[in-house]
Amino acid sequence: MTIDEAWMDLVEKEDRTSPEAYPEMALIAREELRDYMVSAAARAASTTALVCESVLSEAFDIIRALLDTMPPALIDEKPKVIEQARAYLGDAA
């Protein structure tokens, strides 16, 4: 979300008032701004977590596909590769 989007979201409320001499300004209470910022941060964190989870899932899918095509001579290396992938990417599988 951009600053302009956040501003429009905050000021385009039906009960929002502006000083008559300054129609481009908006009266926003400190608590309202705090609550808005906390909510926006939570939404951003949630979106980031979903993206990270998706990327990790795709990475493990690729690793699994590669492991499935390993030549029989390297089959004993499979557990090591899985362990290294988990250490590098985390345990998202």
Image: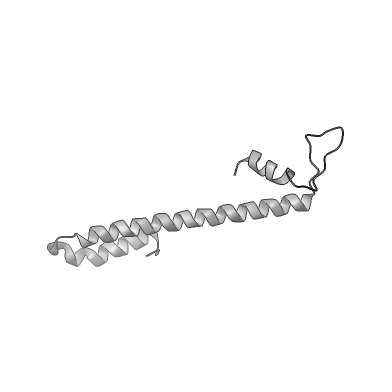
Residue at the left extreme, as displayed? 73
Query: Could you say where residue 15 lies in the image, as x and y percent from the top left?
Result: 80, 48
Q: Which part of the image, by quadrant, shows the N terminus? A: top right
Q: Is residue 42 left or right of residue 55?
A: right
Q: Measuring 13% from the left and 64% from the top, which residue is drawn there? A: 72
Query: Could you say where residue 60 lies in the image, as x and y percent from the top left?
Result: 33, 59
Residue at the right extreme, as displayed? 20
Q: Nearer the viewer, residue 29 or 18?
A: 18
What is the count of numbered marks? 0
Q: Which part of the image, by quadrant, shows the C terminus? A: bottom left
Q: Nearer the viewer, residue 2 or 56?
A: 2
Tell me the colour scheme of the image: one colour
Q: Measuring 18% from the left and 67% from the top, which residue is drawn there? A: 76
Q: Measuring 62% from the left and 52% from the top, which residue is drawn there? A: 41
Q: Quadrant of residue 54?
A: bottom left
Q: Nearer the viewer, residue 56 or 76?
A: 56
Q: Is residue 32 above or below residue 93?
A: above
Query: Could you say where residue 43 lies in the image, as x and y percent from the top left?
Result: 59, 54
Q: Nearer the viewer, residue 76 or 17?
A: 17
Q: Is residue 58 left or right of residue 51?
A: left
Query: Could you say where residue 62 lies in the image, as x and y percent from the top left?
Result: 30, 56
Q: Measuring 36% from the left and 61% from the top, which residue is drawn there? A: 87
Q: Is residue 93 above or below residue 20?
A: below
Residue at the front extreme, as displayed? 14
